[in-house]
């Protein structure tokens, strides 16, 4: 006897497929839109890492992450980001590739996982 299950894996409240598909988008991997909070630490090679600050993650892919922060960042800067907790936790070293002003005192950052 053949039986099919109709159950599907639950979707996370923080991740959904990104609806943006622009031909000028050069990303190699599909982005997942996000409403998650992340925590960022600048990794400047110092022996003691600075206190993390909160960022608003707007998309994540296998290769990188996009987020909004109140801190301006220079392209090339290395930092660490932590998103989520428990089995859905993502913690990675990354390199900032873009920083664009967004509104007053906010910056949209694009970073590639190292």
Image (cartoon, rainbow, N blue to C red):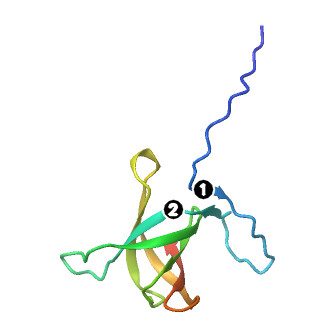
Rendered location of residue 75, percent (x, y):
48, 89
Residue for badge 2 = 36
Q: Is residue 114 visible?
A: no
* Residue drawn at (48%, 82%) of the image: 96
Eyeballing the image, is 87 above or below 22? above
Question: Where in the figure is residue 83, as x and y percent of width and height?
Answer: 44, 61
Image quadrant where residue 8 sits: top right
The percent coordinates of residue 86 (x first, y second) are 39, 47
Using residue 8 as the reference point, say whether residue 75 is left or right of it: left
Q: Residue furthest top?
A: 1
Taking the image as shown, residue 51 lies to the left or right of residue 37, namely left
The quadrant of the picture occupied by the N terminus is top right
Residue linked to disc 1: 15
Q: Vertical placement of 98 versus 26: above or below?
A: below
Marks 2 and 1, Cα distance to the nearest angstrom? 8 Å
In this rendering, is residue 37 above or below 46?
above
Mark linked to residue 99: none
Q: Residue at 75% across / 20% down in the picture?
A: 4
Q: Secondary structure at mark 1?
A: strand
Q: Which sits in the foreground, 36 or 111?
A: 36
Mark 2 or mark 1: which comes first in sequence?
1
Residue 72 in view (yes/no): yes
Tell whether label 1 touches label 2 (CB within 8 Å). Answer: yes
5 in relation to 22, above or below: above
Local packing at callout 1 (Cα closer than 10 Å; few below 14, some 14-19, many 20+) is: some
């Amino acid at each position: 006897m053949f039986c099919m299950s109709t159950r599907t894996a639950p979707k996370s409240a923080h991740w959904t497929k990104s609806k943006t598909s622009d031909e000028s988008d050069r990303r190699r991997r599909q982005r997942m839109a996000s409403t998650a909070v992340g925590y960022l630490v600048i990794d400047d090679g110092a022996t003691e890492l600075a206190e993390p600050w909160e960022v608003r993650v707007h998309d994540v892919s296998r290769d990188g992450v996009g987020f909004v922060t109140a801190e301006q960042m220079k392209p090339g800067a290395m930092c660490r980001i932590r998103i989520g907790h428990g089995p859905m936790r993502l913690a990675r070293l990354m390199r900032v590739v873009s920083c664009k002003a967004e509104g007053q005192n906010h910056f949209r950052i694009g970073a590639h996982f190292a």
